[in-house]
Amino acid sequence: MRPPPAVAVVILTVREGALQALLINRGGGPDAGRWALPGGLLLDGEGLDAAASRVLVRETGVADVYLEQLYTFDAAPTAKATSSLLVSYFALVDAVRARLVSRETWQPGWFPLRALPEMAFENDAVIGYALRRLRAKLEYTNVVYSLMPEEFTLTELQRVYEVITDEQLDKRNFRRRVLSLAIVSPTSRRAARGAHRPAQLYQFSSRKPMEF
Amino acid sequence: MRPPPAVAVVILTVREGALQALLINRGGGPDAGRWALPGGLLLDGEGLDAAASRVLVRETGVADVYLEQLYTFDAAPTAKATSSLLVSYFALVDAVRARLVSRETWQPGWFPLRALPEMAFENDAVIGYALRRLRAKLEYTNVVYSLMPEEFTLTELQRVYEVITDEQLDKRNFRRRVLSLAIVSPTSRRAARGAHRPAQLYQFSSRKPMEF
DNA sequence: CCAAAAGTGTTTTCCGTACACCCATGC
DNA sequence: GCATGGGTGTACGGAAAACACTTTTGG
């Protein structure tokens, strides 16, 4: 009897100034203390994208975010081989909107990519893969929309880029770039957030994945 | 009973001045005349890469060429659902080295991407995907090594680039680029191929996929 | 009036592109 | 000697990178 394929989703967010991934931990049993990517088996008649989306909604409550297939792995040869293939996805969510569930088993938690816990087999490789893909897409697409709230300042957007690329950006050059790419546009509102000049609020021109 | 996953391989070559894909055609039976990507079901205990490689060797006789996973599709809902998922790969082979088999059923043949025959369901999409990926990798990797013989002239290499990108390249700029990327290096031999000055022969510095 | 972040232009550097002539060979 | 493809350098333009000061607000 051949086991069904599984999907695993690398759910990334920017939180507390760091790029973080959502992992889940089986509370009890033999695997206690081992963290893993959220995922699940493909249901009967269910499509891959639908399965990935289902896992994402189950873990974070959010839908309509950036979700893209990454790579397909031979499933880890576990004792009880529950899956044959592992189809990985990655998703980008705004940490503010994501609401983690609290379960008895498979407690979820955010982990900075810098400080991932000991993880099940291929999971680190999958996360590394997602990070490379995200960094590549950052340069020429609008993917970050999925990490940002509806309105934001350009400085906030710049911080997110800096956290993802792990390098400092020049304020003027950054602004010129995102404005000339026309991926964001100013709104009519401004943000008064402290003892300084209020910042213009911007929004994404499009909150859909870009075409090619 | 859940059917096993399938692999399909987009095998590309440059032949007769055009980028061509290998397709196979069921000689008789109900699907007669329909062309499709070569592929096969995943064998018991077989890894994905191994399956793709097996298909490639079966069709062309060559191994050790560039072979990369592309994308995983939900399997086409055929009448007799023989597969659940379709994991696609693409491979680049030197047409000179490839030796197509001659079988009673599933006769293989090369088709210019410009003039693909009527094909089974998702197959055109898969080929389009492979082409986009190839063009992207062309710019910053050495993937073409897999389309070239051991030794070649820079003009021959340029022709291959031109066929893949479907645009004319400037001879001097092209040479500067490949030489400065250091993906090729001159050999000690030259090619006397006609009534003109012999050309320097080059080889790839590395005939392995590049790391990142 | 001071601290804090917002906002704004110019100069320099580097890379991609365009472009034309001489060279070595076979016949 | 002529036809054929091989081989080479330079000038220009646009994009990316470096860089510092003024503005607006809250307290």
Image (cartoon, coloured by chain):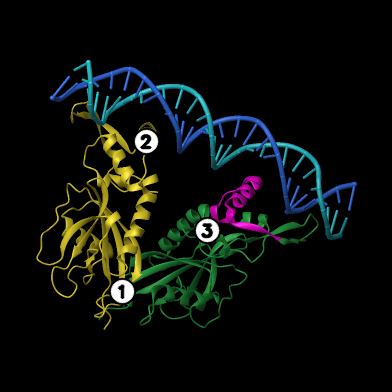
Chain colours: A yellow, B green, C cyan, D blue
Image side of residue C24 versus residue B80, left or right: right
In this rendered view, identify the residue nearer to me: D1 or A151: A151
Q: Which residue is rendered at x = 21% and y = 72% of the image?
A: A44
Q: Secondary structure at mark 1?
A: loop
Image quarter where the N terminus of chain B lies is: bottom left
Image quadrant where residue B205 sits:
bottom right
Query: Residue at the location (36% across, 59% down)?
Result: A129
Q: Residue at x 18, y 68 (%)?
A: A33
Of A195 and B172, nearer the camera is: A195
Disc nearest the viewer among 1 and 3 = 1
User: Residue beneath label 3, please?
Assistant: B114
x, y percentage for residue A20?
25, 53
The residues tagged by marks 1 and 2 sit, at their Cα atoms, a distance apart of 42 Å
Which residue is the site of mark 2? A174
Q: Chain for mark 2?
A: A
- Look at the image and give the residue range highlighted in magenta: B160-187
Q: Residue at x 33, y 43 (%)?
A: A162
Decide: few, some or many residues near mark 1? Use Cα within 10 Å; few <14, some 14-19, many ≥20.
some
3D distance between C-alphas at marks 1 and 3: 40 Å
| Relative depth, front residue between B144 and A160 | A160
Q: Amino acid at mark 2?
A: Phe
Disc 1 marks which amino acid?
Answer: Ala
Chain under callout 1: A
Residue B130 placement (x, y as % from top left): 45, 61
Q: CA distance from mark 3 to mark 2?
A: 41 Å
Magenta-span inclusion, residue B158: no
Answer yes or no: is residue B25 visible.
no
Q: Are marks 1 and 2 on the same chain?
A: yes
Residue where numbered disc 1 is placed: A76
Three-letter code, disc 3: Arg
